[in-house]
Amino acid sequence: MSRAVRFLPLLVILAALVVGAGYRYWQSRLEAPLSLEQATLYEVPAGAGFHRVVADLGEQGIVADGWAFRLLTRLEPEAVPDLRPGEYRLTPGMSGRDLLGMLDRHEVVTYPLTIPEGWTFAQMREALNAAEKLEHRTEELSDAEIMARLGRDGEHPEGRFFPDTYRYRKGVSDLEILRQALERMDTLLAEAWAERREGLPIETPYEALILASLVERETGAPEERDRIAGVFVRRLERGMRLQTDPTVIYGMGEGYDGNITRADLREATPYNTYVIDGLPPTPIALPGRAALEAAVNPAEGEALYFVARGDGTHHFSRSLREHNNAVNRFIRNR
């Protein structure tokens, strides 16, 4: 037997030991902590591949052993993350494996955008424009152009967007937030309309949306929403004007300075419910779910009037005399 043949088993063992040691060393490099002294935001650019991200992390000094990550594509291709663009929060103590898992789970940093109930569409647009991490595509567009971009050409935007807290990642466009809010309102309005009380003096879901916006703007106490809606519904049923101040304010637009005068109440605008009969032509705000539900399921009762007490609640009256007494008590004396 030749000497080479006699040493072949030993060579195989040595090769296996070398390969095993190399594999363990490679794994140790992936398990090693990233070079981070403090939490850092790293952004995966749109369209970036895995090798580009690894190279970028190496240039920033976050990953010291880029070769170990690149080798992953050959030895463990199933462990190569499916990248999603966005920001990722890297923290001290994270290992390379932790980083790979974060990237694969698409744990992008998200930011909240809160649109309160009762805001107008104009206020919503201001909030979108002020959100720094959003991609601003609507800032220079008119309301009509925005609705056209959303596939709702010719629709008035007021009231069409659901007020809520929306989370977004860097680079998402404001149009996407608007689309989410629009679809959310469509869904909730349809659900509310399907559960409406029979015999209401409103004939379409859009009229319910208008009524809900009035309820939202008049409500300081959440528990009063259905009672406010009840007053409006009874007035509509009797052919009485709604006479609600928020519609006057909305119709005044930028001319509103915080006060409503008698002249304002007499001015004929499409939204002045002291002058017009029935509902205004569009919503006057973005109503929430509770306002939608109250509009289609108002509380029973006899009250036809209400006046603010000054503490967020209202005094409800059945007669004009009772209402005038309440006005003297809660408004004029104050």
Image (cartoon, grey):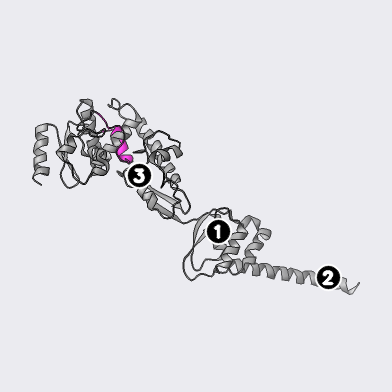
Choose the circle earlier in sequence order: 3 or 1.
Answer: 1
Residue 100 included in the magenta stretch of the image:
no
The residue that mark 3 highlights is 163
Q: Which mark is residue 101?
A: 1
Could you tell me residue 88's position as x and y percent?
A: 50, 59
Q: Characterize the local packing of mark 2: few (<14), some (14-19) or many (20 or more) Cα atoms within 10 angstroms.
A: few
170 displayed left or right of 67: left
* 3 or 1: mark nearer the eye: 3
- Residue at 37% across, 42% down: 162
Question: Seen in the image, is 99 located left or right of residue 288?
Answer: right
Q: Is residue 279 magenta?
A: yes
> Relative to residue 23, is residue 110 depicted above or below?
above
Residue in the foreground of this view, choosing between 269 and 165 = 269
Which span of residues is magenta-colored?
A: 278-298
Q: Which of the 4 image quadrants contains residue 70?
A: bottom right
Residue that numbered label 2 is attached to: 8
